[in-house]
Amino acid sequence: MTAANPLFDYLLRLGDDSLVLGQRLGEWCGHAPALEVDLSLANLGLDLIGQATLFLELAGQIEGAGRDGDRLAFHRDALQFRNCLMVEQPNGDFAQTIARQFLFSTWQHLMFEALTQSSEPRIAEIAAKAVREVTYHADLAGEWVVRLGDGTEESRQRMLDGLDWHWRFVGELFAMDAVDEAMVAAGIGVDKAQLRAAFDARIAAVLQEATLPLPAYPRPALGGRSGHHSEHLGHLLAVMQHIPRTYPDARW
């Protein structure tokens, strides 16, 4: 993939990942298995929305076309979103949501740690704040993987099923294209392939504690970074964007 403005596209990827997953977690409000969990997932979602706001506001400034973070969030169609496929997947049951959070937050933590060294000071600043939040996200999800995996027969099977749903999306997290390479060459972005060993080690350590098997990773599902999404994103955006698109000139 090529982009006329690779920095703009790179910021969209970072912002869209957090925005879409934040929206997904918001769907749990009032539906989680316990009040404490309901509040935990809501807080994770709010952290992610905060990250998305910062990245998308910066993207709008870089684009220079008069679009702010709200305009980028609520007035783009699915083909214009650059999030990875994993974050748009349906919540499923609680175990499937935890599996997604475990895998994505483990990767995002490594990504933000590396981005704190970005030569673009505004990205480094956002990453430095976000990495503290994502540390908690990854720890919370990992604890639940252990509790469910090493729990009852049913909780173990649900955790296995949840992980099985998401393994195919892991490869896309580390895939590099022309946008990534341009950002690495500029000292702004991260060579994601170099994060894979640390990711695999963290995943293996938690799965071992949870008495769950290591996966045989399937062929990766790709396309989110270039705007080729599953049907799930369209349904999510229809809900998320409904009010701003219905009342485009409203001031809140």
Image (tube, helix red, strand yellow):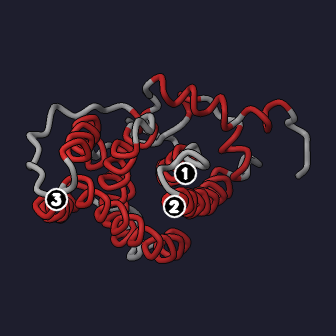
Q: Of the residues under marks 3 and 2, which one precedes in the sequence? A: 2
Q: Quadrant of the N terminus?
A: top left
Is label 3 or label 1 in front? Answer: 3
Q: Of the residues under marks 2 and 1, which one precedes in the sequence? A: 1
Q: Residues within 10 Å of mark 3 (few under 14, many from 20)?
A: many
Residue 31: % across, % down = 55, 45
**Which of the 4 image quarters holds residue 42?**
bottom right
Q: Residue at x 52, y 76 (%)?
A: 125
Which is more toward the observer, 165 or 251? 165
Q: Label 1 amino acid?
A: Gly
Q: Of the residues under marks 3 and 1, which one precedes in the sequence? A: 1
The residue where tag 1 is placed is 22
Residue 58: % across, % down = 62, 60
**Which of the 4 image quarters holds residue 200?**
bottom left
Residue 252: % across, % down = 88, 52
The residue where tag 3 is placed is 210
The residue where tag 2 is placed is 44
Q: Residue at x 36, y 51 (%)?
A: 98
Q: Label 3 amino acid?
A: Ala
| Residue 30 against residue 107 in the figure, above or below | above
| Residue 119 against residue 208 in the figure, above or below | below
**Which of the 4 image quarters holds residue 197?**
bottom left
* Secondary structure of residue under mark 2: helix
Decide: marks 2, 1 in contact (CB < 8 A)?
yes
